[in-house]
Amino acid sequence: DQQVKQNSPSLSVQEGRISILNCDYTNSMFDYFLWYKKYPAEGPTFLISISSIKDKNEDGRFTVFLNKSAKHLSLHIVPSQPGDSAVYFCAASVGRGSARQLTFGSGTQLTVLP
Amino acid sequence: GAGVSQSPRYKVAKRGQDVALRCDPISGHVSLFWYQQALGQGPEFLTYFQNEAQLDKSGLPSDRFFAERPEGSVSTLKIQRTQQEDSAVYLCASSLILNTGELFFGEGSRLTVL
């Protein structure tokens, strides 16, 4: 049973446009959500997070939106740059803090075309 | 070191062989995690250490998998009698105990079982 789902395995966007990556979850106990970015042959790197007490968190070009009633979150990248091309993983946990295991989605390959 | 270091980066094993994968976390990071990432999937939790104590091993797929962190720093993931389904990238991550839960991942050890 996949508790965190990323239904789009790939997404292509033109440079300068907005990239929107989506993630759905089924476990209502999840209350902390993160996005990780992964380049080939590297480990995932943390990008941005959001607690369930918020519905939006912004960090530069990256904004994460959380819709708890729909159990849906999305990552917006504006404007998209070729260096953003990577696999993006959505992750969720019960409780904030490093003592909690993360449950990851299967990832979305973003390609930003110059 | 500056980041999480894993070795070997690549390991080819014949079915039935034992393998050992090493993780050197960021200095001072109390928490250490092992994740397994199959091809085309997101990382899946295996086990978690706080210092030398293994607090959660619920993700280990069978008793052929064993992890240790005897002195609270370097960790080893051992897989006995490897099988083809063990082929995956094994990711190690570390974090500060009191941080916001973002993990610092190593580059991973890619295991191929023939």
Image (cartoon, coloured by chain):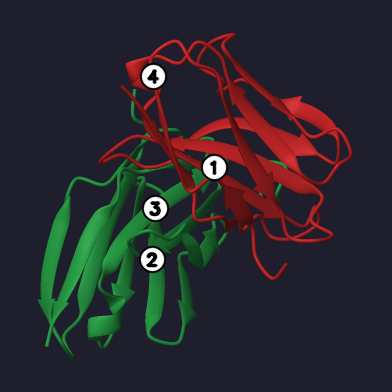
Q: Amino acid at mark 2?
A: Phe
Q: Secondary structure at mark 4?
A: loop
Q: Position of residue A72 (x, y in %)?
A: 33, 50
Q: Chain of mark 2?
A: A
Q: Position of residue A25 (x, y in %)?
A: 36, 40
Q: Is residue B27 left or right of residue B91?
A: right
Tag shown at residue A65:
2
**Mark 2 and mark 1 residues within 8 Å of each other at the beta carbon:** no
Q: Position of residue B19 (x, y in %)?
A: 55, 25
Q: Amino acid at mark 1?
A: Leu
| Residue that numbered label 4 is attached to | B14
Between discs 2 and 3, the one toward the N terminus: 2
Q: Chain of mark 1?
A: A
Tint of chain B = red
| Mark 2 vs mark 4: in front | 4
| Residue that numbered label 3 is attached to | A90
CA gap between label 4 and label 1 equals: 31 Å
Tag shown at residue A102:
1
Q: Chain of mark 3?
A: A
Do callouts 2 and 4 point to residues on the same chain? no
CA gap between label 3 and label 4 equals: 34 Å
Frontmost residue, B10 versus A86: B10
Give the residue displayed 37% in from the left and 42% down from the top. B42
Give the residue displayed 50% in from the left and 10% down from the top. B81
Q: Can you tell which quarter of the image residue B96 is in? A: bottom right
Q: Secondary structure at mark 2?
A: strand
Between discs 2 and 1, the one toward the N terminus: 2
CA gap between label 2 and label 1 equals: 19 Å
Of all chains in the rendering, the one displayed in green is A
Q: Secondary structure at mark 1?
A: loop
- Residue A95 visible in the displayed image: no
